[in-house]
Amino acid sequence: MVLILLSLATALLSYLLGARLNRMMAFALALLPGLGALILGVGTVDLPWFSEHIRLTLAPNHWGLVMLVLTNAMVPLIVLAGWRDGVHFSLQVALTFFMQAALNGVFMAQDGLAFYIFWELALIPIYFLALRFSEGDRFAVTLKFFLYTFLGSLAMLASLFYLYSQTAVGDDGHHSFAYAALQAVELSSTEGFWVGLGLFLAFAVKIPLMPFHAWQSDTYTQAPAGGTMLLSGIMLKMGLYGLFVWFVALAPESLRYEFIADWLNFRDLILIMGLAGILYGAFIAMRQNDAKRLIAFSSLSHVGLIAMALLTLKSDGTNGAVLQMLVHGINAIGLFMVVDIVERRLGHRDLTQMGGFAKSSPLFAALTLIVVLGTVAVPLTNGFPGEFLMLKAVYNSGTGACGILAALTIVFCAVYMLRFFQLSFMGPEKQVLSPLSWNEKWALMLIAGMVLYLGVQPQVVVDFIQSNTEQWLNAIAESGGMLS
Amino acid sequence: MSALLIVFLGAIALLFAGINRPEKALKWPAVGILLLAAATAFANWDWVSWLELPDTMMAYSSMDQMYVALICLVAALAIAVFEGLESLGSDRLGLMMLSLSGGIMIIGQENLVMLFLGIEVLSIPLYVLAGSDKRNLFGNEAAIKYFLMGAFSTAILLLGSAFLYGSTGTLVLSTMTNKASMYAHFGVYPPMLTAGLILLGIGLLFKISAVPFHFWAPDVYEGSPARSTAFMATVVKIAGFSALARVALAFEPMVLWFQSSVAIIAVLSILLGNLLALVQSSPKRMLAYSSIAHAGYMMLALTLVGQAAFSVESILFLYLASYSLASIAAFAWVEWASERSGKVDFSMFQGLGQNPWVSVNLVLVFLSLAGIPLTAGFAGKYYLFSAAFEIAPWAVGLALLGSFLSIAYYFRAFQQAWSQQENQESISIPVGFAVISALILLVGCAPMWFLP
């Protein structure tokens, strides 16, 4: 609650400050919720909300805590270097903080309805950011984005209603939306499939998994840089977090649902979607000349692997996936920041017209290279441990061919990321970049620092979430029998 | 009963006070009278109990009093957020309050005669109000259309009452319940009873404009002056749904007989209303279709009759309150924006997004209509859908689909609001808009306080 209230307060404050808000103040405000939570704790609450038995329960688990760290650490960086100066700076910052509040709620909610509400709420600020500040045919693109995600959300709501109606009636004669109660519901395979499908749709659209990705590239490309960072860096993690915590853990029965007996069940289907995303995203990314679009598709490719790893239901895989969610957040924000820094100076993002930035700005090149290597998952950068754990789990989960194909992600990623770096920073100097401003420099240095730190110390995260992961996997094994 | 008298006497007083004053000057006294009536109802303060009126005609339970308070507040808002007219006279304000007293009668009715009387008192001033802008041809069309349809539907309602009287021997609803439970006990319903119930239902469905009795609504809503439309879309719906709920609860023993037809009408209204709203080019007409869809959502509440765990009336109350708040604001915005820009299509919203304060208020209204969390609209929909899900999950599924469709047309206002590039003209909106937005947020964040 502390986190949410502080984020809302900073949102209101920066809106009221208007033109008086400068970048340093915005950065300080952005740090406030995180620092407040460090001092006061995240503030777990359990209050009656829609009625005495439908409560606002906020009590993050360890996975949620990792995501909260990501949210509250990255929002300051987005404020620091994501939004451009201008008359709308305070509005953009205010909406970002509003979004931060909703995201914090999503990762803390332990109650189905509260989760849904924060989930929807996170959509509102980013919709208006995209609508207001996008380029191109903004209305069509943002409406497509909103309709896609809203349809998914409504499917989730229907599933939550069903689970709610199946929960045991408590002492007060009512059903409950509490996470534990929803988790305790036993579903038949068919029931589970429909419930699971509703939940899955919401998350698959947000992640996005392969057939639900149509909104992604346009939205990522046309949204303003800060919006793209929010979308890819943090909002996407809502989908991945939800996929495991609110779909797999709530309706593990659905994973066994057979579309074609003994050959294709729901879990296989999701693995295939993930794999398709990995390959499709990578192939498209290799051919892109628009730097932002390239990174959008690389993101599609990376999250496909994370989704696969979550569905392995092995502790290595899921631990790796959580680690990679954190890492992907950092790296995606870093890469979009790099693209935005270049675009601000050149006015375009066409890779074929770039080149040789390394000569004029070596520091920028070095920092970018660190983030690029992190994305490629070179050992000692943050990408490596997560990808390694995930690929190991995917390979070991009985689908060797899947594992090998998924492992191609690293190769392909090296191809398009290095191409990106080569075309823009290496080669003959086609255009000169003016030096980085202080905020850009600091934001990138902080990101590069995180890339290196998590590359050397991934164990911090893995140890932190281990006990939680085991708990979940055991619960899933008991109710779903999938841990074979 | 006190609220009814206050509103009725207030209407008469206003009519006379308007003889030599412009309507504008009487706007706030009218609002004051309505607030007084609402407060009386809310406090359940009955200073005419010495009259000892028979309770087989009208009786106000504590839930009814909440409805009375709501309908008075909504009427007060409808008068407050619209600019009053410059011209002399207060006939329109007076007519609105007369119509409102009909609504209050409907809420308290215990007898089909009172229902009929209430509906007539509610409707007749509205026929006049629909055509009150005499220079507007569409207004005249709206008035005549509304009058014909209204008269027609009242006749059907009357025929239904006659049949019900014939089959049960009474017009008192509570006595009818006993008869109905007797029939339900044996599982045979005389045709005259079912025919009466169907006709009565049709008469009421006309009033709330549910599909397939909706076709008058778009023309009437579009043609009438915005203030009258806002009044029709909210006050009439509150009264109409209160009557429907009262009748449905009176025939609770027969719930299995009408439950599925109610759900089907609800779903048809939701889907048709939302689909047709998608293709409208005039915001006012779009709101008319959206109000048909909202009538559909509220019909879902009627499937809950006979469920001990839910109170149909309190679920409906919150939905009606949230719908009325947003609906009045939406019509007021449309009126204000078209006055400002001189346009009648969606481009009237152009440029409103430039000013953050204006856009926040505008956005809240449409988000609430669409049912996005933390607005009143979501609270209303949540209680309704989660309860109805246990009776008719398929209907709730389709209702959710309807909400999805509604996004596409509510958000068209936002498209226009942000379509124009920078122009730094200053825009100021009436205070009433901000008040409604604040209420929408308040109900959305703490819905528990508003559930009677």
Image (cartoon, grey):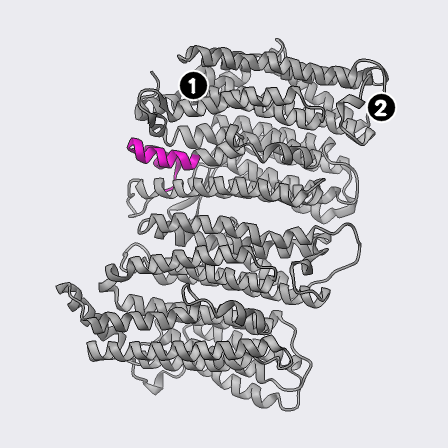
Residue B182 versus residue A405 in the image, above or below:
below
Q: Which of marks 1 and 2 is nearer the N terminus?
A: 1
Query: Residue visible at 31% across and 40% down?
Result: A167
Q: Which chain carries label 2?
A: A
Q: Position of residue A286 (x, y in %)?
A: 65, 19
Q: State the predominant SS element of the stretch in magenta.
A: helix
Viewed as shown, does residue A35 lie left or right of A177? right
Which image quarter: residue A431?
top right
Give the quadrant of the N terminus of chain B.
Answer: bottom left
- Amino acid bearing label 2: Leu
Magenta range is A176-199
Question: How many residues crowd mark 1 within 10 Å: few (<14), some (14–19), many (20+)?
Answer: many
Indicate yes or no whether the magenta region holds residue A134.
no
Query: Marks 1 and 2, how far apart in space?
Result: 45 Å
* Residue A383 seen in this snapshot: yes
**Disc 2 designates what residue?**
A433
Query: Residue visible at 41% across and 60% down?
Result: B298
- Amino acid bearing label 1: Thr
Q: Where is residue B324 in the image (x, y as percent from the top left)?
A: 51, 64
Residue A450 versus residue B50 in the image, above or below:
above
**Disc 1 designates what residue?**
A312
Query: Residue visible at 56% across and 64% down?
Result: B285
Name the foreground residue: B134 vs B33. B134
Q: Position of residue B21 (x, y in %)?
A: 66, 87
